[in-house]
Amino acid sequence: MYGFENITSNNGWAMAAVGASIVFAGLVILSIVISQIHKILALWEEREKLIIRLKTLLHAHAAEGIHAPAFAQRQFPSADELAGDYEPVVDQLKSPFTLSQLFEAAKENDLPHPHLSIQRLQEAGILVSEGDGTFAWNR
């Protein structure tokens, strides 16, 4: 089998069309690049100005993004302030109560930092241990 019959049986026409298309696309891309080479060369010659302009833009955008200090130190409330916040919660509990009951009541009332607050109340002598695992409010 020779000639056109062999080309047809082995997909030669499709391969020829794809090859011609690839060559034509490459030539089109090459002609576009050559027609725009003057712009690329102008950018290359003025690269120092371009780099300086980009750096000033980046600094301007970075300065706009900062609105507030990144860190603000907050003080934990004193024992007296905590006692004022916890007193309505303790009034709901039957005296004596366990720390787990106080903790759950504090979480239900959205009081901040229940563990630290209860510890501070104990250290200040406002929350007093009864000795059998229960606590009383000493205000």
Image (cartoon, grey):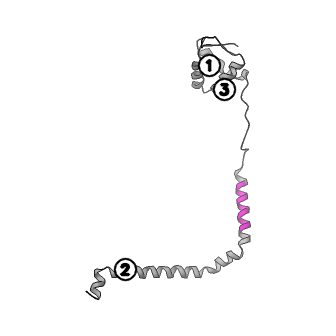
Query: Where does residue 43 sit, x and y in percent of width and height?
Result: 68, 74
Residue at 66% in and 26% down = 116
- Which numbered disc flags the more N-terminal residue, 2 or 3? 2
Q: Nearer the viewer, mark 1 or mark 2?
A: 2
Query: Where does residue 6 sit, x and y in percent of width and height?
Result: 28, 84
Q: Amino acid at mark 1?
A: Val
Q: Residues within 10 Å of mark 2 (few under 14, many from 20)?
A: few
Q: Amino acid at mark 2?
A: Met
What is the spatial separation of the Cα atoms under label 2 and label 3, in whole angstroms? 77 Å
Q: Which residue is mark 3?
A: 116
Residue at 58% in and 25% down = 107
| Dominant secondary structure of the residues highlighted in magenta in the image | helix
Highlighted range, magenta: 51-62
Which of the two residues, 30 or 124, is positioned nearer the viewer here? 124
Query: Where does residue 99 sit, x and y in percent of width and height?
Result: 60, 18
Asked if the residues shown at circle 1 and circle 2 are in contact, with their CB atoms under 8 angstroms apart, the answer is: no
Check the image and report above or below for 40 versus 89.
below
In the rendered image, the quadrant that contains the N terminus is bottom left
SS at badge 2: helix
In the rendered image, the quadrant that contains the C terminus is top right
Q: Which residue is mark 1?
A: 89
Asked if the residues shown at circle 2 and circle 3 are in contact, with their CB atoms under 8 angstroms apart, the answer is: no
**Which residue is at the far left?**
1
Query: Where does residue 111 sit, x and y in percent of width and height?
Result: 63, 26
SS at badge 1: helix
What is the spatial separation of the Cα atoms under label 1 and label 2, in whole angstroms? 84 Å
Q: Which residue is mark 2?
A: 15
SS at badge 3: helix
- Which numbered disc flags the more N-terminal residue, 3 or 1? 1
